Amino acid sequence: MAGAEQGGSPVEIELKLALDAEAMETLLSSPLLRERARGDLRTRELRNTYYDTPDRRLHARKAVLRVREVEGRYVQTLKGPRLADGAVAARNEWEVELPGPEPRPDALDDPDAHELAGLLLPEELAPVFETWVRRRSLVAVWPDAEGRPAEIEMAFDDGVARADGRGEVPLSELELELLRGDAGALFGLAEALREVVPFRIEPQDKAARGWLLATGDAPPVRKAEPLDLDARCTVGDALGRILSAALRHWLDNEPAAVAGREPEGLHQTRVALRRLRSALALFEDVLTPEALERWDGELRWLLGTLGPARDLDVLADDLLPPLLGACGEDAALLAFREAAEAARARAQDGVRESLRSQRAGDLAFHLAAWAARCGWREGADHDLLERQKEPITPFAARVLERRYRHVRKRGKRFAHLAPAERHRLRIALKKLRYGIEFFAGLFPKKRVERFREAATRLQERLGHGNDVDVASRLAHALVEPLGPERVAEAAIGGGQLAGWYARQAETVERDTRRAWKKLKRQEPFWADAA
């Protein structure tokens, strides 16, 4: 049941880990479980039926209504939207026992539950999908960061999700649910388990996977949620919140990036990874060199594996369509588009391989565990520990000022910068923008928005120029795999693309220079707090 309360309502707090059948059996027979278990292993067969209205009102409210049949009993559960906190899933949950299998929303007597579900009549509800799961569970005791014992239910689930007419998908995961104690203990136990078998953080719960199966929808794409830091935060507190938010952004979008049906999924995954790198760089003054090197190296590796696919997404979806719209069914352009789409398909295979790799899975898990236990304190000397305890606002002001000076330095003699120099300016500006987004809540809103708008405008102009430059360099490489009879035609199409954007360069350049001047005119909103 719940491990905490949120606004007076019970909250389910759990960490979901995906692992295969062999790893599951290895864990179940491991000495670690025998040493930490309180009581015997319990095995149950769970049949869960998930309901919604024909117009999907519950789904629109990010609510889940389920009736579980287990050992002749029926339990109805209503779950609310996920409360984002890194890799840990926390959400309001209400349960009530029913006399039979039919859902009864009126049986929930908590006003918060009724507010979440809205007006809901039993006759409106219909099954959407089911899950059939064998659950083997036990309660383990594990100490939190302060050495206090926490109770954690370990539920080893294997089974399937089924939807009429849509087939089924396998389910194999370990749920660590906090029953009593601090949520950090979940990662303490999980880190010990990771020394026994490999696994990955499971970014989707069973309801989400069942819903996608039943509807055929693509996995959702989510942008980063606004982060409203409190001025009372310490530097260490702020770092933890920023890392958790960026990690949640990554995990939320990874299924969409792997599926490859929506290019925005890959884009948002890369944004999340860049936000993680930027956060670590912004806080470099309070981190050990070892921590910076460890995380930045792994994040840079993963970003590098995803970059080619994103470049091809931009080429195929953003740069080619305007030209095709203007030129119609031009044979050379169509041949070039064919080459671009073939290259994109190959690159998407690389995205899938990278994100599903154990290396990427370990990166997400170990970074989440590091953030959960405030790992920046580990190996920190007295000076670093004291800096981590400082108030966040003056620290943020100093960091933003340093980043802004770097942008100004990179932009000197702007009109004469070579493409490579503008690329470096764009990267410096992107880091400043992420810093602005992280720290925006600490400063006057109107001043922040004026500065952010100017920075965003310039970054978009510089980004367009970089995309065109990358596409021009890609053009030759794309046509090489084609057969001899198509190479020449596709190469002409690539030349047309380069020529089209070259003719627009003068107009784009004027707009980019105006954006640079507008940014330089902005008054730094952090100046008074430095």
Image (tube, rainbow, N blue to C red):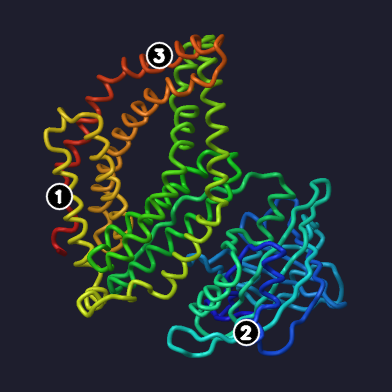
What amino acid does circle 3 point to?
Answer: Gly
Q: CA distance from mark 3 to mark 2?
A: 64 Å
Q: Is residue 73 above or below residue 204?
A: below
Q: Is residue 66 left or right of residue 73?
A: left
Query: Mark 2 sits on what residue?
Result: 140
Q: Which corner quadrant holds the C terminus?
A: bottom left
Q: Residue at x 21, y 59 (%)?
A: 399
Residue in the foreground of this view, choosing between 303 and 444 = 303
Q: Is residue 397 left or right of residue 186?
A: left
Q: Residues within 10 Å of mark 1 (few under 14, many from 20)?
A: few
Query: Mark 3 sits on what residue?
Result: 495
Circle 1 or circle 3, nearest the eye: 3
Residue 192 location, x and y as percent?
54, 76
Q: Which corner quadrant holds the N terminus?
A: bottom right
Query: Mark 1 sits on what residue?
Result: 405
Residue in the foreground of this view, choosing between 288 and 372 = 288
What amino acid does circle 2 point to?
Answer: Ala
Q: CA distance from mark 1 to mark 3?
A: 39 Å
Q: Is residue 10 above or below residue 263?
A: below
Residue in the foreground of this view, choosing between 227 and 386 = 386
In the image, farthest residue toward the left: 413
Q: Earlier in the sequence, mark 3 or mark 2?
A: 2
Circle 1 or circle 2, nearest the eye: 2
- Disc number placed over residue 387 in the picture, else none: none
SS for callout 2:
strand
SS for callout 1:
helix
Q: Residues within 10 Å of mark 2 (few under 14, many from 20)?
A: many
Q: Residues within 10 Å of mark 3 (few under 14, many from 20)?
A: some
User: In the picture, residue 125 is in which quadrant?
Assistant: bottom right
